[in-house]
Amino acid sequence: MMITMLNTLKITAQDLNKPEIAEKLKATLLSGGLVIFPTETVYGIGGHALDPLAAAAIYAAKGRPSDNPLIVHVACFDQIDALAYREQAYIDALAQAFWPGPMTLVLRKKASVPQGTTGGLSTVAIRIPSHPVAQAVLSLVDVPIAAPSANLSGKPSSTSFSHVENDFTGKVDVLIDGGDVPIGLESTVIDATGPIPVILRPGAITQEMIEAVLHEPILDHSESLVDGAPKSPGMKYKHYAPQARLEIVSGSDEDLLIFLRQAIAIDPKVGILGPHEVLDQLEGGTHLDLGSRAHLDDMAHQLFGALRALDDQQITHAYFIAIPDQGVGKAIMNRILKAANHQVITLEETSKGTL
Ligand code: AMP
Ligand code: MG
């Protein structure tokens, strides 16, 4: 397919208040064009969700396989019934508790949603974002907008405007600069088609938060496979990967420091991503400080930017210091395990060996 370079219009969130810009944005989306906008999770690359050609354009711009379904964004709850069946009683309770916000529900789709948007599935993933710019775009066009994360397929999601500028200038019609996004990890995806909700992708809305609302246990299948295939199609692809060889290293602070000092002695440029409680005790190496492990939300916020910084600084080998797999830590570890292609070094076993 011929890829034509587009003349990308770059605007700020404030520009949306100008009638001529608002009109242009609306016309772009309603005619099948693509607009990148900030959401509270990550930047999204948006197109008309009910227009199969717009969905095809999103896949082409991202270089994304077309069996990987798109999340459909709507401005308010009333828009959902036109798109999907609300079959389970808990759906309304979850919506009440977490929408607008970083939660995506997978529901059985109605005929209005083209298979091109859902990667051929009979279900559709729906989210109501809370970010004021995302809300402004959705209210302006008054149609559902399919908006996967705005990154080239396989690369870290975009959490600041420079990321989308680098990846998509010339490939989409409009870029909206909304500064840094507040959360920095993609939404929690929940399969809401069966009697018990099932987490397909962990995110800022944690299992504990959902169980506290529903007063009953739910399931987390984010790491599980069905007959060798992931339940959520996006999970089978290489994700978030930097160019560097990335390994996760797990152990006590004492063992970590011994291991990382050896690693720095071998490669003084080696990348080290982790909490500053550990980094502060190390000299040398290329530090990518994710903040304090007492503030996992902050670490989540820094994660994708740090993975991109590895590429910018042409780091060829890096270690990520593992954090506890709890709360938002679960979502962080889910992303980093993919970025590292599941390469984990557990120090109890290896610290006395070689690197
Ligand atoms: P992204 O839009 O890049 O944040 O990724 C969307 C995620 O939602 C991917 O992991 C998809 O596999 C998942 N997803 C979207 N639609 C569905 C669906 N109908 N069923 C299961 N997972 C879905
Ligand atoms: Mg994505």
Image: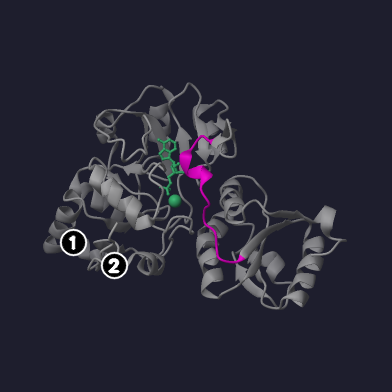
Q: Nearer the viewer, mark 2 or mark 1?
A: 2
- Label located before the other in sequence (2 or 1): 1
Q: Is residue 242 magenta?
A: yes
Q: Residues within 10 Å of mark 2 (few under 14, many from 20)?
A: some
Note whether 270 is above or below 124 in the view shown: below
Q: Residue at x 18, y 57 (%)?
A: 25
305 vs 117, left or right, is right
Q: Position of residue 225 (x, y in %)?
A: 58, 35
Q: Position of residue 90 (x, y in %)?
A: 43, 25
Note whether 291 is above or below 236 in the view shown: below
* Residue nearest the viewer, comparing 133 with 352: 352
Secondary structure under the numbered disc 2 in the rendered image: loop
234 vs 107, left or right, is right
Magenta residues, as a range? Answer: 230-244
**Amino acid type, callout 1:** Asn
Q: Residue at x 18, y 55 (%)?
A: 28
Q: Residue at x 31, y 40 (%)?
A: 116
**Amino acid type, callout 2:** Gly
Secondary structure under the numbered disc 1 in the rendered image: helix
In which quadrant is the C terminus drawn? bottom right
- Asked if residue 38 shows in the view, the reply is no
Give the residue at mark 2: 170
